[in-house]
Each structure stands twice: as structure tokens, then as C-alpha cells.
Amino acid sequence: MPAGTTTYVRMKRMIVLGLIAGAAPLGGCVNVSAPDKPIEINLNINVTQEVVYRLDGEAKSLIQQNPGIF
């Protein structure tokens, strides 16, 4: 093994150890807590309904002949 190879391996190890040591403080702790107030979801919903009816000709004439039936 050439003499420069050992130095290269050591330098590579130092770089890896330095990256690990530098990344360690970034790990941190994550805290999750519920909010003090309830979550409010405001949904503006407009509901419209359209009723379409069709009467049979015979039923229509029966209703016209007897207006007090309904």
C-alpha cells in the first residue's frame, strides 16, 4: 500500500466523523401539544333545493274539477 493511501483513509475518516459530530446538534427534540382553544372550522354552505313536478293530464283535470281536494 502506498504511503499516501493511509493519509487519504485517515482524512476520509476525519471528514465523516466531523460530519457526524456537526449533525448531532441538529437532531433536536420535537414537542407536540394540543391547542388551548378548540379548532374552529367555518364552512359557508348554501343549500338550495328545487322541486320539479309533473302531473298526468287526468290528475290535473281532477284537481281542477275539485279545488278543495288538497
Image (spheres, grey):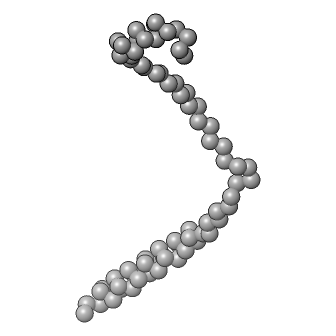
| Image-based side of 28 in relation to 35, left or right | left
Position of residue 35 relative to residue 53, above or below, is: below
Whole-percent x and y of residue 31? 65, 65
Nearer to us in this view, 15 or 37? 37
Q: How many marks?
A: 0
**Residue found at the very far right of the displayed protein:** 36
The residue drawn where x is 33% and y is 89% is 6
Position of residue 41 relative to residue 52, above or below, is: below
Position of residue 28 relative to residue 42, above or below, is: below
Whole-percent x and y of residue 7? 36, 85
| Image-based side of 52 in relation to 47, left or right | left
The residue drawn where x is 53% and y is 14% is 69
| Image-based side of 29 in relation to 5, left or right | right
Whole-percent x and y of residue 2? 25, 90
Nearer to us in this view, 66 or 15? 66
**Residue found at the very far bottom of the displayed protein:** 1
Nearer to us in this view, 43 or 12? 43
Q: Quadrant of the N terminus?
A: bottom left
The residue drawn where x is 46% and y is 11% is 63
Whole-percent x and y of residue 42? 62, 37
| Image-based side of 63 in relation to 1, left or right | right
Nearer to us in this view, 7 or 30? 30
Q: Quadrant of the C terminus?
A: top right
The residue drawn where x is 55% and y is 11% is 68
**Residue found at the very far top of the displayed protein:** 65
